[in-house]
Image (cartoon, helix red, strand yellow):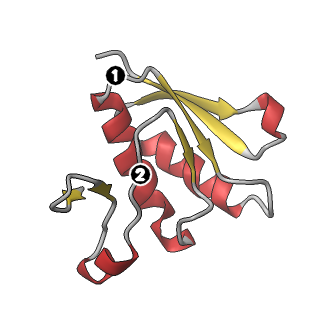
Amino acid sequence: MRRNTSGDRYFINRPEALKLAHSVPIEGTLDLHPFEPRDICTVVNEYVREAYKAGFEEIRLIHGRGTGTQRGAVQATLEQHPLVDTFRDAPESHLGATIATLRES
């Protein structure tokens, strides 16, 4: 993760993406709709890491229902992330969001 000169956080996985970067506050919920599908895994990895550093025990990732492709990518990323203890579909979202419980510090 890089910071610009104003201190805002940006998720960047390649140099040419700098002009397309998003500022993402760490608030416990992340809506993934603004991100390109190719960037989802990188964004989820960085968000989990930053949420863990900020002391969150649980985070919610909104990926939408659609065909299930984003859900699969999000959950595959969470399954491999060392800071994620468990994850589950958010019951009220009808498969449109995933809740991840982070490991204890």
Asked whether the beta carbons under mark 1 and mark 2 sit within 8 Å of each other, the answer is no
* Eye-nearest disc, 1 or 2: 2
Residue at x-position 65% and y-position 59% = 70
Disc number for residue 94: none
Identify which residue is drawn at 31% across, 28% down: 54
Q: Which residue is mark 2?
A: 24
In what element is the residue under mark 1? loop
* SS for callout 2: loop
Spatial CA distance of label 1 from label 2 is 16 Å
Binning the other alpha carbons within 10 Å of mark 1 as few (below 14), some (14 to 19) or many (20 upward) gives: few
Measured along the vertical axis of the image, is residue 85 above or below residue 42?
Answer: above
Residue 89 vertical position relative to residue 34 in the rendered view, above or below: above
Please give the residue where the numbered disc 1 appears in the rendered image: 55
Question: Which sits earlier in the primary sequence, circle 1 or circle 2?
Answer: 2
| Quadrant into which the C terminus falls | top left
What quarter of the picture does the N terminus occupy? bottom left
Seen in the image, is 93 located left or right of residue 55? Answer: right
> In the picture provided, is 14 more to the left or to the right than 66?
left
Tell me the kind of residue under disc 1. Answer: Gly
User: Percent position (x, y) of residue 50?
Assistant: 32, 39
Mark 2: which amino acid?
Val
Count of all numbered marks drawn on residues in the image: 2
Residue lying at 20% horizontally and 57% vertically, measured from the top left: 6
Q: Nearer the viewer, residue 13 or 9?
A: 9
